[in-house]
């Protein structure tokens, strides 16, 4: 009988070499980096200046890490096998982002994304070389799992109402802590209270938990020591419980597919162990699910120490029982299982039947939870989520809409893409309906629109080659060699598969895990020599080290400078909220920002606002000229930025260039076609300018402005009609209707054109019950005046208006008595 291999680890695919002090420097620095990054809101690239500073610090640290790594594994760089060549080709990914910058929808976002891509490249290179070493591999795997377990327990601290404690524990280094509490570690949305831990987004936390669930199952089923079984078995319950408390339907849908893929990679004994552990942990979780859920909801409403302790007792005691069972299984069952299934494992397709059966069984259970009364056993908030799993629910329909709209953007930037952040910058110009999402909710679609077909093909070929080579090597290798780096495969596959449904990789921490996983898979590949490319070792090593070293230095220095700029913009925002700052204080900070990034959008808007005020107060043309030059330069780089366009419109208006302001307002409408406030602005300005032209008897200008306002109104009506064709179950998103502002503006235009009946119809749409709002009251007054001109009345509305403002009668009579001779 062959010698059992259960529990053997880190063999064959890793190696032992001479280790010096630099070995520990690099490993310790990477450990700290992996512990620090998730608590910075997982480095969320939220396309806002509030998120940027910590991202730039992470990029800086990754550059320092790769420089230290290059110093340590300098002699390993030979560029004579496929692993080394992949480590060189990784730079094609940031290069594709660099190329896409030159036609970017947003230069600012594109530069940010380029830096993030370089960070991924540095992490990949570190993984590809460091994780060849047996000890480094073990250290980094322990770090990944250890940090994951900390994140999970941190989530429960917040779930049980102890957010101030959590804030104290991580507040000294975590950017997500405000007022002593980690923001939105438990957050509420239309689905109820959802556990998010460090991510502030439940679905991405679910993707992370799914990856760590499978990683934990892998560890508990393969490691040999009793304390490994106890630890990883202990954490299965908190992971499954947290996954359920995220209320993530996407996580529940994707999990069986990822499980199937992973089970197919395991030998029968491991497959059986995974299923045993999942059944035990799942059953234990089901027992405590209701009380833990209810306690958490109570603690969110009002904290009580005794009740919170009861919640902790449920989680910890149940987890301990499962951990002890895992320890017993690992000690007594697993070795015998290996012996019993050794012959089975040698049969063809032996590893296929159990995963397929498990998938079928899992599907049946999921269907039962969705379609039968079995779901009534679940807590109410979780039961509702199960009931809503179908392809006609709003979130599914919205995602398909995002994907179709992303393809519209892709058609405008087919080859090299719209640059990093292209979707977030320009989605309003392409959206099918007025939803609000600066993320495509699909990593691959988002990548496609950012780098175009060429960059996307490079990416797919790159990761496809790594997966192909890793899987081929995995199949051919001995049992011992398979397990050394399989954890990285688990993490990469889990996150990437879930990213088909969500924007997980907009969290740079998740991207770090993926690229570290890809690096670990590369480290495990066969050291197959390059067949057609023979390189001089010393020369190529020098070129490669120099190239990566220079890139790391440039990227690190740039990130340092950008972090300073982002920090100064945050200070400016704080000054603006305090309203106590002087012009000089603002100007000093903003000049510093713009000396680093000359078109930083928020800094441009802040400075433009100051210069506009300066011109208003002094009429000094120098203020106007500087302001206009600043805005024009920024608008060239940020053509879709709404705040910059608004600021340009304001500047033209202040300078008396109403025609330019109105033209820009109208011309920009297609970029913000579902923003109802934009139409309000167009229509309001159309009436004001048309009225001015009427007063000056400029008939042509009057017709031009009034017609522009009516055209905008027709676009609103067309949009409202289109929204009625949305599939049942899909929410339209933001309000898009005839608002009181629109009704008032269009009604005034119709009255000036003598179209009283049409004015009545439009103004009636703007009547609201809340007459404390000035616009609502004015729309009602004009409605009543138009009715009076028609010889009609609306007593109910009239009584409400008079009750709100007795003087409104005089205004109604005055408007009704006006006679216009405007031309149509």
Image (tube, grey):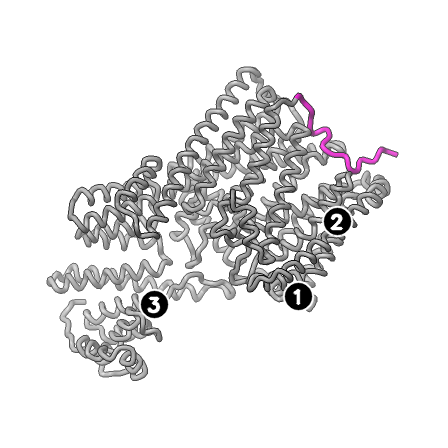
Q: Which numbered disc covers residue 33?
A: none
Quadrant of the frame with the N terminus:
top right
Q: Residue visible at 65% across and 63% down?
A: 370
C-alpha span from label 2 to label 1: 33 Å
| Residue that numbered label 1 is attached to | 371
C-alpha span from label 3 to label 1: 41 Å
**Image position, residue 762 (x, y; %):** 29, 72
Count of labels in the image: 3
**Image position, residue 47 (x, y; %):** 43, 46
Left or right of 130, for residue 618: left
Q: Nearer the viewer, residue 589 or 133?
A: 589
Left or right of 567, for residue 265: right
| Residue that numbered label 3 is attached to | 738
Q: Are marks 2 and 3 in contact (CB under 8 Å)?
A: no
Q: Nearer the viewer, residue 571 or 145?
A: 571
Indicate yes or no whether the magenta region holds residue 9. Answer: yes
- The earlier-in-sequence mark between 3 and 1 is 1
- Judged from this view, the residue extending furthest toward the left is 697
**Label 3, residues with CA under 10 Å away: few <14, some 14-19, many ≥20:** many
Indicate yes or no whether the magenta region holds residue 553. Answer: no
Q: Which numbered disc covers residue 323?
A: 2
Q: Secondary structure at mark 3?
A: loop
Left or right of 318, for residue 36: left
**Image position, residue 552 (x, y; %):** 48, 28
**Image position, residue 10 (x, y; %):** 71, 32
For the magenta stretch, what is the residue range? 1-18
Predominant secondary structure in magenta? loop
For residue 65, say whether it is visible.
Answer: yes
* Mark nearer the viewer, 2 or 3: 2
């Amino acid at each position: 009988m062959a010698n059992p291999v259960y529990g053997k680890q880190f063999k064959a695919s890793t190696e032992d070499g001479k280790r010096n002090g630099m070995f520990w420097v690099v490993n310790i620095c990477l450990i700290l980096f992996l512990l620090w990054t998730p608590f910075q809101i997982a480095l969320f690239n939220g396309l806002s200046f509030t998120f940027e500073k910590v991202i730039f610090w992470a990029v800086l640290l990754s550059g320092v890490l790769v420089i230290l790594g290059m110093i340590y594994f300098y002699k390993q760089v030979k560029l004579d096998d496929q692993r080394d060549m992949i480590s060189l080709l990784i730079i094609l990914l940031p290069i594709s982002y660099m190329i896409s910058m030159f036609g970017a929808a947003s230069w600012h976002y594109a530069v940010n994304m380029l830096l993030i891509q370089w960070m991924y490249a540095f992490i990949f290179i570190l993984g590809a070389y460091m994780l060849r070493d047996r000890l480094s591999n073990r250290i980094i795997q322990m770090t990944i799992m250890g940090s994951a377990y900390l994140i999970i327990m941190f989530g429960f601290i917040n779930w049980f109402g102890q957010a101030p404690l959590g804030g104290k524990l991580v507040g000294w280094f975590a950017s997500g802590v405000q007022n002593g509490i980690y923001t939105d570690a438990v957050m509420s949305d239309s689905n109820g209270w959802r556990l998010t831990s460090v991510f502030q987004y439940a679905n991405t936390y679910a993707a992370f938990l799914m990856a760590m669930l499978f990683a934990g199952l892998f560890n508990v089923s393969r490691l040999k020591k009793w304390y490994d079984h106890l630890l990883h078995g202990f954490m299965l319950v908190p992971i499954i419980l947290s996954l359920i408390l995220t209320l993530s339907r996407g996580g529940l849908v994707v999990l069986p597919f990822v499980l199937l893929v992973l089970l197919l990679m395991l030998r029968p004994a491991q497959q059986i162990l995974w299923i045993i552990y999942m059944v035990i942990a799942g059953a234990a979780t089901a027992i405590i699910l209701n009380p833990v859920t209810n306690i958490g909801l109570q603690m969110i409403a009002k904290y009580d120490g005794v009740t919170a302790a009861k919640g902790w007792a449920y989680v910890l005691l149940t987890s301990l029982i499962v951990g002890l069972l895992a320890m017993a299984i690992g000690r007594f069952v697993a070795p015998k299982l290996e012996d019993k299934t050794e012959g089975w494992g040698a049969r063809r397709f032996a590893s296929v039947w159990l995963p397929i059966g498990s998938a079928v069984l899992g599907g049946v259970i999921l269907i039962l939870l969705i379609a039968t009364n079995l779901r009534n056993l679940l807590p109410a908030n979780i039961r509702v989520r199960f009931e809503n799993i179908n392809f006609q629910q709003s979130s599914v329909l919205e995602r398909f809409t995002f994907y179709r709209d992303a393809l519209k953007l892709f058609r405008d930037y087919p080859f090299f893409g719209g640059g990093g952040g292209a979707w977030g910058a320009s989605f309003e110009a392409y959206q099918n309906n007025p939803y609000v999402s600066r993320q495509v909710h699909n990593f691959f679609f988002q990548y496609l629109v950012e780098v175009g077909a060429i960059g996307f093909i490079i990416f797919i070929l790159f990761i496809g080659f790594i997966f192909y080579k890793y899987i081929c090597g995995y199949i051919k290798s001995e049992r011992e060699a398979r397990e050394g780096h399989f954890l990285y495969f688990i993490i990469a596959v889990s996150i990437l598969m879930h990213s088909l449904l969500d924007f997980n990789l907009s969290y740079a921490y998740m991207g770090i895990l993926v690229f570290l996983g890809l690096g670990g898979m590369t480290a495990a590949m066969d050291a197959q020599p390059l067949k057609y490319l023979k390189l001089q070792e010393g020369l190529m090593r020098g070129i490669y080290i120099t190239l990566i070293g220079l890139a790391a230095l440039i990227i690190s220095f740039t990130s340092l400078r950008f972090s300073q700029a982002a920090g100064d913009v945050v200070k400016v925002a704080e000054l603006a909220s305090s309203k106590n700052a002087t012009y000089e204080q603002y100007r000093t900070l903003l000049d510093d920002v713009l000396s680093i990034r000359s078109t930083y959008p928020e800094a441009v808007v802040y400075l433009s606002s100051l210069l506009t005020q300066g011109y208003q107060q002094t009429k000094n043309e120098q203020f106007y000229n500087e302001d206009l030059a600043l805005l024009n330069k920024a608008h060239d780089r940020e053509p879709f930025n709404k705040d910059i366009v608004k600021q340009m419109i304001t500047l033209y208006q202040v300078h008396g260039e109403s025609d330019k302001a109105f033209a820009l307002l109208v011309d920009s409408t297609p970029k913000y076609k579902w923003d109802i406030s934009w139409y309000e602005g167009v229509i309001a300005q159309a009436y004001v300018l048309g009225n001015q032209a009427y007063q000056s008897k400029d008939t042509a200008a009057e017709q031009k402005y009034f017609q522009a306002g009516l055209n905008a109104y027709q676009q609103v009506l067309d949009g409202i009609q289109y929204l009625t064709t949305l599939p049942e179950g899909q929410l339209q998103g933001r309000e898009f209707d005839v608002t009181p502002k629109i009704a008032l503006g269009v009604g005034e235009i119709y009255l000036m054109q003598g179209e009283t009946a049409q004015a009545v119809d439009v103004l009636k749409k703007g009547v609201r019950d809340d007459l404390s709002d000035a616009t609502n009251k004015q729309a009602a007054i004009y409605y009543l005046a138009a009715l009076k001109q028609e010889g009609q009345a609306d007593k109910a509305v009239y009584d409400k208006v008079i009750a709100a403002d007795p003087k409104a009668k005089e205004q109604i009579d005055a408007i009704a008595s006006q006679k216009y001779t405007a031309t149509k």
